[in-house]
Image (cartoon, rainbow, N blue to C red):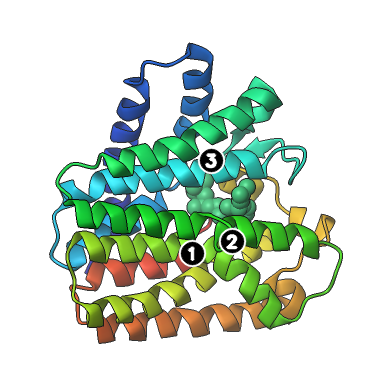
């Protein structure tokens, strides 16, 4: 049996150390570095880099080759959170248990810290040690697609536009597949590319990632209703206040929990079919649906 909490603690520690070292070593304006490090050090779960590394290892690839792509993904994710919290977007005061970046450093610096983390993510990926040029080009292109207008940014745009309107479940899923799902799908695909997994394994892992992404978002919506602010590190109840479309809002809490279970089971079935070393990935999937933050 995998002890997922020990696994997460150990891998998070390694990711945290390398992230802080990477940014601290940059020869850049102090204020910008401080504001980038503030959000990086605020302590997220590091689920995306850990998933990327775990998939690499499940497909027989090396931890060391996955580290830089994992760091790159966490930098990009942190940029999205900094920008999402800005007054022009969600206007949040609290993130990862601390005042949001713009509350601490002001809006201009927060925007630039986000921009810096977004661009640094691609620098880090393009210079990743141990990967060949073909792998790097594939990863850079796929990360851009996952994060850009066809992915997270497009999903965020539609999510903002949908506030106050009632969507059906298909439209909601279309938003979340891009806003939250694409980066998680990228994490899985990147791990498979780094480990040079064959096309059939990659296809089956893609199905796993899709269900995992939706499950992650449903759980996120449920935590916004049932979670504890002190544990989550951000305000709860914000979705309802902003009249956001959520899974519990459309399906009721019980309905959302059933949908969560359905995607969890489908994710496990796809993982089983991929025929990789799946114990850690199955445990990670379970963690994602039972997490309290
Ligand atoms: C600003 C372009 C742009 C996009 C923002 C990611 C995002 C899109 C918005 C964040 C709002 C939100 C609550 C999204 C739902 C899922 C999500 C990404 C939650 C945060 O990710 P976690 O739980 O956070 O992995 P930590 O802090 O642990 O890294």
State whether residue 5 appears in this view. no
Residue 280 vs residue 72, the one in the foreground: 72
Q: Is residue 54 left or right of residue 20?
A: left
Of the pair 227 and 145, the residue shown nearer to us: 145
Above or below 82: residue 223: below
Report which quarter residue 270 is drawn in: bottom left
The answer as to whether callout 2 falls within 8 Å of ligand 1 is yes
Furthest residue to the top?
30
Q: Position of residue 213 (x, y in %)?
A: 49, 69
Q: Is residue 248 left or right of residue 271?
A: right
Residue 64 place in picture, x, y as percent: 16, 46
Q: Relative to 135, is 165 above or below?
A: below
Identify the mark at residue 79; answer none if there is no mark: 3
Question: Which residue occupies 60% across, 78% down?
Answer: 257
Image disc number at residue 200: none
Q: How many marks?
A: 3
For label 1, being within 8 Å of ligand 1 is answered no
Residue 176 visible at all = yes
Q: Is residue 32 above or below residue 191?
A: above
> CB of mark 1 within 8 Å of CB of mark 2?
yes
The local secondary structure at tag 2 comes to: helix
* Rendered-image quadrant of the N terminus: bottom left
Q: Distance from label 2 to label 3 (Cα)? A: 14 Å
**Nearer the N terminus, badge 2 or badge 3?**
3
Residue on which the image places disc 1: 182
For marks 1 and 3 on the same chain, the one whose residue lies earlier in the sequence: 3
Percent of width and height locating residue 178: 56, 65
Looking at the image, is 244 positioned above or below residue 23? below
Residue 174: x, y in percent? 62, 74
Q: Residue at x 32, y 48 (%)?
A: 70
Q: Which residue is mark 2?
A: 179
């Amino acid at each position: 049996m995998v002890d997922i909490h020990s696994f997460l603690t150990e891998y998070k520690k390694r990711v945290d150390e390398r992230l802080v070292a990477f940014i601290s070593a940059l020869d850049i304006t102090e204020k910008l570095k401080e504001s980038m490090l503030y959000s990086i050090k605020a302590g997220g779960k590091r689920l995306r880099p850990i998933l990327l590394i775990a998939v690499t290892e499940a497909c027989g690839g090396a931890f060391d080759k996955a580290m830089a792509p994992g760091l790159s993904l966490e930098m990009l994710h942190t940029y999205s959170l900094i920008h999402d919290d800005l007054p022009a977007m969600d206007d949040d005061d609290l993130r990862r248990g601390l005042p949001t970046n713009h509350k601490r450093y002001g809006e201009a610096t927060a925007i630039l810290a986000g921009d810096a983390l977004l661009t640094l993510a691609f620098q880090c990926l393009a210079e990743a040690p141990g990967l060949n040029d073909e792998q790097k080009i594939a990863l850079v292109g796929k990360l851009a697609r996952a994060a850009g207008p066809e992915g997270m940014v497009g999903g965020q745009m539609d999510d903002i536009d949908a506030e106050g309107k009632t969507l059906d479940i298909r439209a909601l899923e279309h938003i979340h597949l891009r806003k939250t799902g694409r980066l998680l799908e990228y994490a899985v695909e990147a791990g498979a590319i780094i480990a040079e997994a064959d096309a059939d394994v990659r296809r089956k892992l893609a199905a796993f990632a899709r269900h995992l992404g939706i499950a992650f978002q449903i759980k996120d919506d449920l935590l916004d209703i049932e979670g504890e602010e002190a544990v989550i590190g951000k305000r709860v109840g914000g979705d309802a206040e902003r009249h956001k479309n959520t899974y519990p809002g459309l399906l009721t809490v019980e309905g959302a929990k059933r949908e969560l279970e359905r995607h969890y089971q489908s994710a496990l079935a796809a993982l089983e079919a991929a025929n990789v070393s799946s114990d850690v990935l199955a445990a990670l999937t379970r963690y994602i649906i039972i997490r309290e933050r």
